[in-house]
Amino acid sequence: MSLEHRFRPFGAPHHALLHPLWIAALVVLVLNDHVLKGAELLPAIVTGKLSDVAGLLVAPLLLAAITGVRSRAGWRAAHLAVGAVFTAIQLSPAAADGWAALMAAIGFPWVITSDPTDLAALPMLLVSERVFPSAMVGSVRVLARRSAELGLGVVGLVSSAATSRPHEPSPTWLPPIYADVFVHNDTEEDIVLRIRRLASETEVACDIVAEDPARLLPAAAFGPIESWTLPPDANLAVLEPGTDHRPCHAVEIDGDALFSFVVFWRDGLPAPDSVPGIGLDEDGPPGWLAISADEAGTLSVEGGMPIIFRRKGGLLEPGGACAAQDDGARVAWDAQTLPRGIHALVGLERGIDGCVELALANGPAEPIADRTFVCMPNLELPFAIGDDVDIQLVAEPAREYLHIRAMQDGEPATPPRELIISRGKAVPDLRGVSAALIESFDCELSVDTCGTVARSAELVLGATEGETTKLAVNDDPVTVTPSDGIEVSVALAHAQNRYVVVDGCAEGAPGLGYDVEVVATVRAGE
């Protein structure tokens, strides 16, 4: 097909606004959305799907008429645009929220919900694309016809969002809910609430977080937004009891004209109870959050228990040794290219990024067989080119570590020369040097971009004659001389005790507790 044929005018879309199928779809859409929904004459699943089917017949032609489409490519583009928006709304609550906000901004507030099963109506776009072009050919002969087209177009504009207008007046009865914590709309208007529950990947140390939930539960700790329209005097459970098995619970709530706040409570306090769908009895179950409005329409919230924590702006994170630690300074090795067993070290080069490239061969005279790297603090390695080295990667329940040691005639060299790079929840054996982690309680808790809440820690090393040495992250390496005459040099790459962790985002050891990374070298003492 030539470009001239594809883009030549093929008819006027507004003529097809009088097509019987389009008019029938429009009538179904209007009756369904404004009469049948909520009247309980048909099941909700039927009325919901009717809106989708009728709307996908009404919307593309209406869009083409409004934009003055005059080519087949433009006609198809109108269908693709409608299909893309419809698909995004059904698959993404965020897209549904955005569409609802757009409609509200132009004076048409809609209640929009995401439902992937609604995508079954998409074939209606193909029906529209094939059927209506035959009605577009011709010219407008009388003003009455154009008036009828315009009138139907206006009705279509108001009705083609495949959604329902908020019910008026407010409901006088809604089914009871079972909740421990619930929101009550104490205003005279519908309010739109955005609720985010803790992500399933988030682990929380409840006792610590309870000290300041609004700061210690950052946005990264919560899951996707769920948008709810709450009618006047209605109640909404913020978390269905029994769906979250953590010992404490939290949700983040905000809304139009409503400040952001965190609700934090212990499991079982308040206890779940039956709550009416409409109305608030302040002497009833205490887990209520009542949202009210002042004369200017600004919303505020109060609760039956001290479980509301407002977000505060301008909070300063601790700095220096107490700051959230940089993941870029962590130890690393390439497990894919790391050979195991005894190899000849034929190349050793430290890069500007702190990583050391090791070139390894089966023997000094053999071609290079493997190149791998290790990343660690700037600690002098106890090896030289030409050494035979034994490489082992050890996984233990509390840690994993890379152990490289010099070999001589197939046996560990004497005196020993070793490199230990460890990461996990505990410190590895450091050739007889005692080592203990101590949390730096002089530091405030830090919060990083992954939502990890942690406090810095230090490593206490036992030296000869009972002396101890403290080592912090970014300190120069410390050398300790055990009683057997060897020197153990230790550097601390990372050390924190973690109280909130979002697994899958946070690096390091999984879960709560210590996250420590240590590097040590062993060599003969002077």
Image (spheres, rainbow, N blue to C red):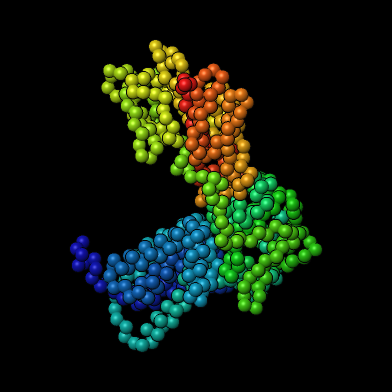
Question: Left or right: 119 with respect to 13?
Answer: right
Q: What residue do we see at 41% from left, 28% from top?
A: 381
- Where 315 falls versus 74 (above or below)? above
- Camera-nearest residue between 75 and 236: 236
- Camera-nearest residue between 469 and 472: 469
Question: Left or right: 65 with respect to 161?
Answer: left
Outermost residue to the bottom: 143
- Where 337 falls versus 73 (above or below)? above
Image quarter (top left, top right, bottom left or bottom right) of the N terminus: bottom left
Q: What residue do we see at 40% from left, 61% from top?
A: 84
Residue 284 in the image: x percent, y percent? Answer: 79, 61
Q: What residue do we see at 34% from left, 87% from top?
A: 142
Outermost residue to the right: 283
Q: What residue do we see at 39% from left, 28% from top?
A: 338
Residue 14 in the image: x percent, y percent? Answer: 36, 77
- Where 338 falls versus 239 (above or below)? above
Instruction: Specify whether residue 359 is in view.
Output: yes
Residue 298 in the image: x percent, y percent? Answer: 62, 73
Question: Left or right: 130 with respect to 48?
Answer: left
